[in-house]
Structure formats: C-alpha cells, structure tokens
Amino acid sequence: MNQPATALAPSAAPNVSASSYTERNQKYWMRNLLVCVFGSFTTLVSLSMLLPFLPLYVKQLGVESQADVIQWSGVAFGATFLGTAVTAPLWGRLADRYGRKPMLIRAAVGMAVVMSLIGIAHNVYELVGLRLIAGLVGGYASASTVMVGTQAPRERAGWALGLLSTGALAGNLIGPLIGGLLPGLIGIRGTFFAGGAVIAVAALLTIFVVKEDFQPAADSKRKRASAASTHAAHGARTHYAVIGALLVTAMMVLLANMSIEPVITVYVGSLGVSPDHLARIAGVVMACSAFGSMLTAARLGALADRIGGWNVIIGCLVVTGVVMVPQAFVHQWWQLAALRGLMGMSLAGLLPAIAKLARHAVDESRTGTMLGYLQSAQFSGQVLGPILGGQIAVHLGMHSVFFVTGSLLVACAGFAHWARGR
C-alpha cells in the first residue's frame, strides 16, 4: 500500500511546496493538539494553584511582617511570567531550528523538576529563584502554541488555537480552586510535589504520544525558494506593520485583563461586600473573565477561520473596550462579575486570531520565532497590566482604570484596522 507513495517521492522532491512542515504533519496534528491541551492545562493548574496559599508559604519560609509577605508574594508570582516573557522568543527560534517536540519535552520536564524543587525551598530567595527558573525553562503553553500553530491546517488553525487557549484558561481557572483544597489534605509542600507529578504525566505523554516530522534541510530549502517570491509579493513595510499590530494587540489582551487585578478586592469591598466574604467574592469576580473566555475561545477561533482573523480581532477589541466602561459604574458585585464575564468572552477571540495571522505573517521556517515573540508580548502584558492598573488607581482613582484600559483597547482596534489596510 505504501509503495506508490514511495515511488512518487523522488519526483515530488523538487516541488518544495509539496513537502511543507504543515503538510508533512497533517496526520499528527489532531493527536498532538489533544496532548498539548492536556499539557497546557496541567502546567497552568500547577502554576496558578499556589495563589490561595502563596502568602502562607512565604510566611512559612521565614518572612514575618505583613508588608514583606505581600511584597515577596507579588515578586514570587510575577517572576515566572517575567522569565517566560524573556525566553519565549529564544525557545521559538530553537523550535524552528530543532523541531517543536523537543521544546515541548524541555518545557514539561523542566516544569516537573522545578515545581517539585519549589516544595523543598528553604527560604523566600530560593522560592523566587525557582519561580523565575520555572518561567525561563518552562512555557509548555507557549511551546504548544508554536506546535499547534504550525501543524494545524490553515482552514482549521483558528479553531485549534482556540481549543488550546480553552485548555490554558481552564488551567488558570481551576488552579486556584485546587490550591484552596490540596494544602489542607497533603500540606503546602505536598501540593507542589503533586503538581510536579501531574506535569510529569504530561511530559510522558509528550515523549511517547506526540509525533513530529521535522526536516530542517527540507525546510531550509523552502525558506530559500520562497524568500524571493515573498519579498516580491509583500514589501518589508507591510510585514512590519502587520507584525507590530499583532504584537501590540497580544500584549493588550492580558494587559486589559490584568489591569484591575491589584485593586479588584478593594473595589469589590467598596460595593458593599462584607469583610467576611470579601476574599471569596473577589475570587469569583476574578474567575469570571477566565470562565467567559472558556465558553467562546474555540468558537471565536472557528469564526476567525470563516470570516478572517482581522475582522475578529478588530471586533473583539472594540467590544472589550466598550464593555470595560460600565464596570466603573456598577453598584453590586454581581454586576461587576457579569461584565467581567462578558469581557472574557470577547477577549477570548483575540489570541487564536492573532496566532493564526502571525503564523502567516512570516515564512514557514520562522513561524516558531514569530509565535515566540507573540508569547513574549502576552506575558509582558501580564506583567505590565497590574503595574499600570495600580499606578492609574493611585493617581487617578480606581474607576479611571476602566476608562483608560477601555480607551487603549479601542485605540488598539484602530491600529489593527490600519495594519489590515497595509
């Protein structure tokens, strides 16, 4: 049965377009997608589950004053995202050179080891250092975006990336819930060991289930063959406009979602919630955006496949910007929760559509590098969002955070519209 295909192989070799990376991996992409969704879910559960007990662990490591506990907790939590933002372009470049699967294995094994080591940290400096290393060597979700974004068929890339985003969002949503339960059952240190063990399962699945047909020599030939035609068809200015708009938009997605995080508990308290229920209600409000995104990520990704990524990006940016404004005028916590849920539903369409367009904004042999920069932009937004939101709240008031963020999103929609015209 395989002989005819083998016989045809030599005659097909000169046609570089017939042996593209995407076409060679057509038979693997769905199986790889499922493993990537599971791996992204488990790694993000492990990273986010420490939110409820992070201050307790910092105190257990010898930090005594309340102010220092809060400060070190923030530094430890943000260190991972800073590390990922720094190294994502490097891992994307290495994925182009050595393949996508090795990057997934590196991220899963590295995360499993580091997560377990966090459970035996002796002081807060080791905690922060290990969280930073987790970001530097980890990034399974980022590596998954590179693999899925380059293997999924063009006509289904938006849906596939949306499904992958759903797994990551579910991990971020469920992680804090698990983190609120496990320490009471197996202890704080035991919780880190459990997280490392689950990531190890994802590592084994990646090693033995994920398949990849990576041929750097063939892809290099494709790169040289397509370079001249690419530059003839598209000017460099056009590419830079498109890439710039995609990177800025990717940063704005998480910046918008995280801008209110530093003051959301205070804001919920100003809505009449009693101190006894404040932490629980604030947690529900925070989770609503992730829950809303889970509901629509795959659907909006599929919509991008049908009507085009730019249309989805511009529409979602405008809707999200508009939904930000009424959050400043709510009188009850449930109104804020509902609006945050709607905001999450519209934000969810951005990342799959951005990744889909980014995949085709550069030559196939540079897709991993491009998607790596995209991941870096996202995590930069996750770091800058709370900083920007906190500064606006201090100098202009909490309500101003919603107005400024909404305005930035609408301005970003205008920038995306301009880039599409280029």
Image (cartoon, rainbow, N blue to C red):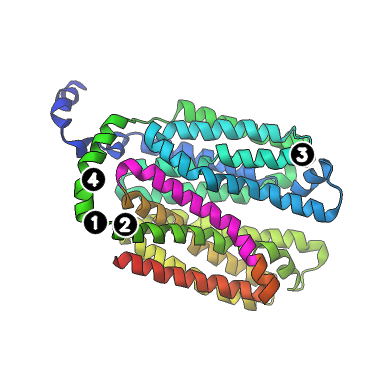
Overall secondary structure of the magenta section:
helix
Q: Which residue is denoted by mark 3 in the rendering?
A: 188
Q: Residue at x 80, y 51 (%)?
A: 69
Is residue 124 something that shows in the picture? yes
Check disc 1 and report its element: helix, strand or loop: loop
Cα separation between marks 3 and 4? 53 Å
Q: How many marks?
A: 4
Please tell me how crowded label 4 is: few (under 14), some (14-19), or many (20+) other residues with Cα within 10 Å: few
Looking at marks 1 and 3 on the same chain, the residue that comes earlier in the sequence is marked by: 3
What label does residue 227 carry, if any? 4
Q: Which residue is denoted by mark 1 in the rendering?
A: 234
Cα separation between marks 2 and 3? 48 Å
Please tell me how crowded label 2 is: few (under 14), some (14-19), or many (20+) other residues with Cα within 10 Å: some
The picture places residue 169, in percent across and down from the top left corner, at 55, 51
Check disc 4 and report its element: helix, strand or loop: helix
Q: Which residues are magenta?
A: 363-389
Determine which quarter of the picture holds residue 113.
top right
Q: Quadrant of the N terminus?
A: top left
> Is residue 364 rendered magenta in the image?
yes
